[in-house]
Amino acid sequence: MRFVSVFWKTTIENVRDWKVLVMTLTFAPFFVALMHFYFEEATVTYRVVVVNHDVGPGGAALIAQLGDLRSAEGGTILRVREEGDLAAAQERLRDRAADLVVEIPENFTGALAAYAAGGDDDRAVIRSYGDPADLNSLLAMAFSDYLAYAYAARVTGDEGPLRVEAVDIGTAPSQDDFARYVPGLLALALMMLMFTAAASIIKEKDKGTLVRLRLSNMTTREWLGAVSLTQCIIGLVAVGITLLTAMAFDYRPAGSLPAAAVVCLVSSAAIMGVSLIVAATLRTVFDLMTIGSFPFFVLMFFSGGMFPIPDVRLFAVGGRAINVNDILPTTHSITAFDRILTSGGGLGDVWFELGAIVLLTLGCFAIGSWMFVRRHMRA
């Protein structure tokens, strides 16, 4: 009965504090809409400047082939611009006005024709100038080199002794750039629980109601269980709204929604554990909105949902590498959402991630409970 009373009390308090609740429920859906419009308007293209010294038609044909490269959605991949002076083209590369500079030699057409006729003494050398520190430059170079080899093979009729085939072993349907961000945005919806969960705990101490709860003989386990149930429900609603927002922008999940709901509930409990640690170190809700923003941004940026995080290996478990960012439960939440909603998997495909989230949840609750009792619940 005490559990139900505290659960109902915490739920009403979260509804009354509607500003924080609305922010929690709408933060991730807002980013879903923002990412959709960004990727809808901004097609990923690579800027290539070509310096064509070729005296024959081969250089112009290669330039046309570079410009004709299209993505699966029909968008232009390489935006090609011709430049007469190599120094000027390289200056554009240094100024980041171009991702790649391609120099076609004078003997390009003649060398291909001679090779097709049986001679191979005169080789054409296509030079690509790029920045190894720029990912766009490396990707543009890969596309350019591939098209140059394909053009040469077609003109000379010689594909060479090696044939390379790409075989897709994934089970997921083709996803656009927007869809790849949805699992991370679902995890972002869960991260926002840190504010409602920590606020629910801190307010009990800040307003003095924690003393009355203790006088009612309520145990710490009952109190935290009731608060956690409220936050799990809020987390399920937040993720549901975020997913519905993504589906409104033509996102189609490939896997089981009930399996994703299980991941959501387990991850919500993990965020509750993190929130308990945060709440144990703070005294007021004002502290939460200022100092508490730091752990939120740690979860947001180092879980791998916003941008790729380099792997820093700590150890291995059963042949599976455990990296530094794996100590964050949201890292495994993003992986689980991706395998279910993008790759079409089920709970059996994310057993490792679910196990990791459960272990981290237990660890966070153990640490957070010890810290909170030690600091706020001693007589």
Image (spheres, rainbow, N blue to C red):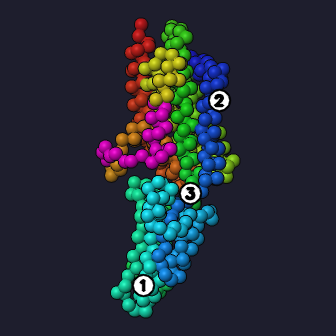
- Element marked by disc 2: helix
- Element marked by disc 1: helix
Magenta-drawn stretch contains 178: no
* Mark drawn on residue 22: 2
The residues tagged by marks 1 and 2 sit, at their Cα atoms, a distance apart of: 67 Å
Magenta-drawn stretch contains 296: yes
Q: What stretch is highlighted in magenta?
A: 295-316
Residue 26 image position (x, y, % from top left): 64, 35
| Front-lying residue, 192 or 259 | 192
* Closer to viewer: mark 3 or mark 1: 1
Q: Residue at x 54, y 36 (%)?
A: 190
* Closer to viewer: mark 1 or mark 2: 1
Q: Which residue is drawn at 45% across and 86% down?
A: 110
Earlier along the polypeptide chain: callout 3 or callout 2? Answer: 2
Three-letter code for the amino acid on which mark 1 is drawn: Ala
Q: Residues within 10 Å of mark 2 (few under 14, many from 20)?
A: few
Relative to 242, 278 lies left or right? left
Residue 367 image position (x, y, % from top left): 39, 25
Up the image or down, 100 lies above or below 265; here it is below
| Front-lying residue, 193 or 217 | 193
* Closer to viewer: mark 3 or mark 2: 3
Earlier along the polypeptide chain: callout 1 or callout 2? Answer: 2
* Mark drawn on residue 44: 3
Q: How crowded is mark 1: few (under 14 residues within 10 Å), some or many (20 or more)?
A: many
The answer to whether any part of residue 235 appears in the image is yes
- Name the quarter where the C terminus is drawn: top left
Three-letter code for the amino acid on which mark 2 is drawn: Val
Marks 3/1 in contact by CB < 8 Å: the verdict is no
In the rendered image, which quarter is residue 173 located in?
bottom right
Q: How crowded is mark 3: few (under 14 residues within 10 Å), some or many (20 or more)?
A: few
- Name the quarter where the N terminus is drawn: top right
In the rendered image, which quarter is residue 207 located in?
top right
